[in-house]
């Protein structure tokens, strides 16, 4: 297999989904955010956001803290150190891929 | 989907982009300046400015609740570079104030330092948001012009506007920019957020 395609195949499948990539990008730019703010930032519906956050939590990329503020449920989400490392690595991989794709010549 | 840069920028500056928070303090400055300007001699009854300040505080609390309930909350990461920038601006402004009060220079050093601070912090925070950067830049340009007016023979420019003291004139100016900047920032914030979308 060509190296460019091998690089594409090597991309983290969990992050390659646009919604999860958008979520981790937003979380990597701040200390933490609550559920509503993440919904606003990504434009995801609440059901979809819950599903994607659960997947990111299972992978250990984010931490969810559920609490009640003024008798209202409030879920605070924070990216983990592993999450920061993974997203940084992902963007680096994409950058490498872009560079390699530009150099690529058909045989 | 929103671009990566846009998402990152919005998440990084989420609370600051909620511009309506700046409106009560801007209004407070404007109204108290108007009240102070209308006084003849030392003010004895401070009931009105205290009521204005309390009303603006109540308005701030309401706006804070509105943002919290409608847009949620994001805790910002404050970098060391940002803290250093803010501390440097504050120290330079204090030093310029000290120099201004002890020398008879024909221009306002404090005004120039504040102008540079606004231009620089505008560039630092709002570079990707042209309209917000433009507001900071406009304030910086106005400050430079007002600071240098005495050099071209216009000593008491504030009296031309019917304001009694330069301090009141600057407070009035910051009040106006606070209100306008706040509203523009809010509109930018709301329009930049993506609408709800479905995803697999």
Image: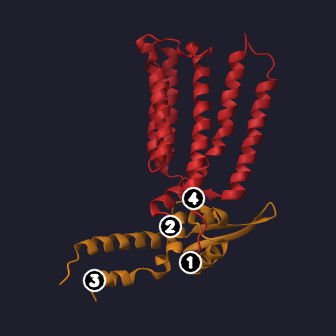
Chain colours: A orange, B red
Figure quadrant of the C terminus of chain A: bottom left
Residue topped by disc 4: B193
Tell if the residue under mark 1 belongs to the same chain as the one under mark 2: no
Considering the numbered disc 3 on the image, is that residue within a helix, a strand or a loop? helix
- The N terminus of chain A is located in which quarter? bottom left
Q: CA distance from mark 4 to mark 3?
A: 37 Å
Please tell me the numbered disc located at residue B99: none
Protein chain holding label 2: B
Q: Chain of mark 3?
A: A
Depicted A45 relative to depicted B182: above or below: below
Spot occupied by residue A54 in the image (x, y as percentages of width and height):
62, 78
Disc 1 vs disc 4: which is toward the camera?
A: 4
Residue at coordinates 58% horizontally, 80% vertically from top-left? Answer: A55
- Which-is-in-front pick, marks 1 and 2? 2
Q: Which residue is mark 2?
A: B1
Both on one chain, marks 4 and 3?
A: no
Pointer 3 residue: A3
Residue A58 or B164: which is nearer the viewer? B164
Could you classify mark 1 by the number of other residues whose Cα lies within 10 Å: few (under 14), some (14-19), or many (20 or more)?
some
Front position among marks 3 and 1: 3
Give the x, y percent position of residue A52.
Answer: 59, 77
Report which quarter residue A3 is drawn in. Answer: bottom left
**Cα distance in 3D space between marks 3 and 1:** 29 Å
Q: Residues within 10 Å of mark 3 (few under 14, many from 20)?
A: few
Q: Residue furthest left?
A: A107
The reply to whether the C-beta atoms of the residues labelled 1 and 2 are less than 8 Å apart is: no
Residue pictured at 61% horizontal, 26% vertical = B172
Considering only order in the chain, which callout, 1 or 3, is on the residue closer to the N terminus?
3
Spatial separation of the CA atoms under disc 1 and disc 2? 25 Å
């Amino acid at each position: 297999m060509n190296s460019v395609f091998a690089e594409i195949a090597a991309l983290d499948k969990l992050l390659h989904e646009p919604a999860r990539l958008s979520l981790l990008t937003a979380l990597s730019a701040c200390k933490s955010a609550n559920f509503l703010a993440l919904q606003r930032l990504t434009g995801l519906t609440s059901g979809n956001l819950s599903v994607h956050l659960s997947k990111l939590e299972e992978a250990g990329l984010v931490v969810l803290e559920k609490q009640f503020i003024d008798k209202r449920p409030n879920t605070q989400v924070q990216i983990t150190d592993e999450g920061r490392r993974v997203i940084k690595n992902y963007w680096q991989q994409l950058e490498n891929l872009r560079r390699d794709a530009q150099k690529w010549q058909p045989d | 989907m929103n671009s990566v840069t846009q998402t990152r920028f919005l998440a990084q500056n989420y609370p600051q982009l909620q511009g309506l928070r700046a409106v009560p303090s801007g209004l407070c400055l404007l109204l108290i300046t108007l009240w102070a300007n209308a006084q003849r001699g030392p003010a004895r009854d401070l009931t009105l400015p205290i009521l204005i300040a309390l009303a603006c505080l109540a308005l701030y609390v309401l706006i804070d609740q509105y943002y919290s309930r409608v847009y949620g909350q994001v805790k910002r990461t404050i970098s060391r570079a940002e803290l250093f920038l803010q501390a440097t601006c504050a120290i330079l402004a204090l030093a310029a104030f000290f120099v201004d009060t002890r020398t008879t220079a024909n221009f306002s050093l404090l005004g120039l330092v504040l102008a540079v601070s606004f231009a620089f912090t505008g560039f630092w925070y709002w570079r990707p948001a042209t309209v917000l950067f433009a507001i900071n830049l406009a304030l910086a340009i106005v400050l430079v012009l007002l600071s240098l007016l005495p050099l071209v023979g216009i000593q008491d420019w504030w009296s031309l506007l019917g304001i009694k003291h330069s301090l009141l004139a600057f407070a009035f100016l910051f009040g106006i920019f606070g209100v306008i900047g706040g509203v523009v920032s809010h509109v930018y914030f709301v329009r930049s957020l993506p609408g709800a979308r479905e995803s697999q």
